[in-house]
Image (cartoon, rainbow, N blue to C red):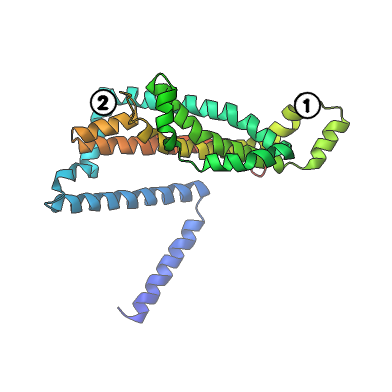
Amino acid sequence: MSTIQVSMGVAFFSQLSQNFKKLPLWVQSTTNAALGMSILLLLWWLGGLAIASNPDTAAFSDFAPGPTFSALGYMLETGSLWETIYSSLYRIAIGLFWGIVIGVPVGVMMGYFLAVRQVANMPFQFLRMVSPLAWMPIAVLAFETWDAAIIFLIVMATVWPIVFGTAHGVQRIDPNWFRVARNLGADGFQMLRRVIMPAIAQDVFAGIRLAIGVAWVVLVPAEYLGVTSGLGYAINDARDVLEYDTLAAIVVIIGVIGYLLDAIAVFLIKRYSWHAS
């Protein structure tokens, strides 16, 4: 290839890039997202071809996109997937609810009271670094039902990001706001309702976003316990009966639902972000 051809190619792509930047932001973001997903699907398809062409791995060829989306379509058509999704979302919702109920008040106290922060920081940091799945034997012994044990594991996964996110938000509040509120006669409840909670909403939702991500990762192995429903159970069941296309389809569903949950959290963060308003 000559130098002139290289120069013409560089000039073409440079002009194409300039024209692309002139498009509306939503067009740019949609195009880039579509490009990223296309690359992912291409890599997946190539991986499927490599698996199918190797005699040692040909038995796992149903992991390829074609069989996966065929199995996904069948599961959606028959409706067998909805109860599985509902069971997992129910456990996530209950676990996240208790994570918020526990995490936000504790985080507010840690952020507002220096003595509480100094006493609680080290033990909380220690507990935060323990994998939520490490509590599995204790959860099985402590709770009567498998559902309760799984929800406990999700609580242990969600509470720490919320606690520390909330505490960080309280620490960032300008002390002058508290002085003004006191001068205006605000009591403790009014201080919490009018000053602290509006000021930390963005940090709380950021902590919830992190908590959802951790909980969604913990959910699948947690549902390997004695339950007979949920996405984790479905993956384990598909593996046992060698239905690799169904297994891959459930993995796709887990990714889609996780992405949607994260998108909801991002929307709430932007909604309560003062910089975005």
Q: Regarding mark 1 in the picture, which secondary structure is present there?
A: helix
- Which of discs 2 and 1 lies nearer the camera? The answer is 1
Amino acid type, residue under disc 1 in the picture: Gly
Q: Is residue 182 above or below residue 148?
A: below
User: Which one is in front, 144 or 113?
Assistant: 144
Disc on the earlier residue, 2 or 1: 2
Q: Report whether residue 264 is seen.
A: no
Is 45 on the left-hand or right-hand side of 143? left
Is residue 110 toward the left or the right of residue 249 in the image?
right
- Near-viewer residue (133 or 28): 133
| Residue 171 lies in quadrant | top right
Task: Note whether 39 is above or below 73 in the view shown.
Answer: below
Which residue is at a point 51% across and 56% down the rendered structure image?
Answer: 22
The residue indicated by pointer 2 is 77
- For the residue pair 218 and 17, the one nearer the viewer reads as 218
Q: CA distance from mark 2 to mark 1?
A: 55 Å
Q: Percent from the top left, x then y, of residue 140?
A: 40, 26
Q: Position of residue 97 (x, y in %)?
A: 53, 26
Q: Residue at x 88, y 32 (%)?
A: 183
> Label 1 belongs to which residue?
188
Whether 218 is drawn above or below 30: the answer is: above
- Circles 2 and 1, Cβ within 8 Å, touching? The answer is no
Q: Residue at x 59, y 32 (%)?
A: 103
Residue 262 lies, in percent from the top left, at 48, 38
Residue 220 quadrant: top left
| Res 136 → quadrant | top left
Residue at the extreme bottom = 3
The numbered disc on residue 216 is: none
Residue at the (27%, 39%) spot, across then down: 248
